[in-house]
Image (cartoon, rainbow, N blue to C red):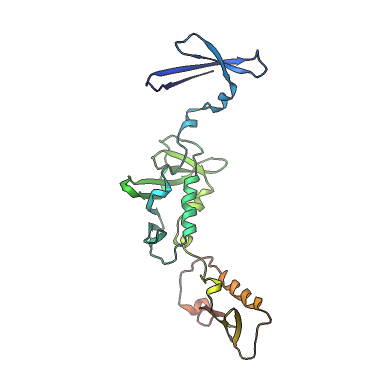
Amino acid sequence: CAKLTAPTAECVSRTLHIGCIDDSQENAGLFAKIDGELPVFVIDASIIALLPESADAVREKRLFTREASQLNSFTYTDAEWTLRFEIGDSGGWQLVDPPVDDTDQLAVSTYIAILKQLEAQSFPSPAVATVPRSALEFNFAGGLPTTEIALGGPVPGSDPAEIYAWQDNGTLITLPAQVWPLLKGEPFKFRNRNLFDFELREATVVSLFFEGVQYRFEREGNRWRVTEPAGLQFESQDDARAILEAMRDVKAVAVVAPRGGNEVHGLGTPLVDAGVW
């Protein structure tokens, strides 16, 4: 059935031969014998489930095999973008190339977590003709060597669809095709998408210009009041909180390349002009 060889504590190899099922007992086991020794004994048959079914079963399947906690920078490159991330002075991730001042920590951490979770679907022949579409270079603390991951094109005829990839040990593998958009890098993916990034309890003034009317709300102690337009008041403090929550939850969905100035996009005379202090 199987033969297992492993070194002992004394660095002497010993071989275990596993034979057929002992069906003479109610809880059937497997006959086994140590090479070079006379006794034949019975072992638990559940060991069969632990034995590899192929050589690939015992290969390293992880795309990213190193410890993410040791990362101090990494660079993503494809035909459109080169993105470089570094651990900043505050201990958080910073997108430093192209430089932004609103790196989304959760987005970067999630991206790294996805890399750590991905495992090979198969190990194709290294002779497969494919080239990378993107690459990730990782730098580690403590002088550890740099490693690289690469993502290639689709695997022809794969069902379900797969793409080629290279592990950080250089081995060619395949991954589910749906991971490509998750790993495709662009600056917007890693930026804070909240247009207003503030704590409700810290807001003291709200300015809102809407449909030609200027509104201004100010907090005095724990209560909000309307200071513009004159004569308008909140029916309930819940109304003020609802406005603040709505403003805090506004998120960007895309970055639009500017063309022809603000008037082209309707920003010269905006529908809404809002601010929070």
Describe residue 250's horizontal placement relative to residue 26 as left or right: left
Describe residue 63's horizontal placement relative to residue 28 as left or right: left
133 or 273: nearer the viewer:
273
The residue at the far bottom in this view is: 230
161 or 10: nearer the viewer:
10
Instruction: Count up the numbered dots.
Output: 0
Residue 262 spot, x, y in % from top left: 48, 78
Residue at 57% in and 42% down: 160
Residue 211 spot, x, y in % from top left: 60, 83
The residue at the far left in this view is: 143
In this picture, is 257 found above or below 172?
A: below
* Quadrant including the N terminus: top right
Describe residue 72's horizontal placement relative to residue 1 as left or right: left
The reply to whether residue 99 is visible in this rendering is yes
In this picture, is 102 found above or below 231?
A: above
The residue at the far top in this view is: 38
Residue at 48% in and 60% down: 189
The residue at the far front in this view is: 221
Residue 85 spot, x, y in % from top left: 39, 57
The reply to whether residue 211 is visible in this rendering is no
Q: Quadrant of residue 223?
A: bottom right
In this picture, is 203 found above or below 56?
A: below
In this picture, is 186 found above or below 248?
A: above
Residue 250 spot, x, y in % from top left: 56, 70
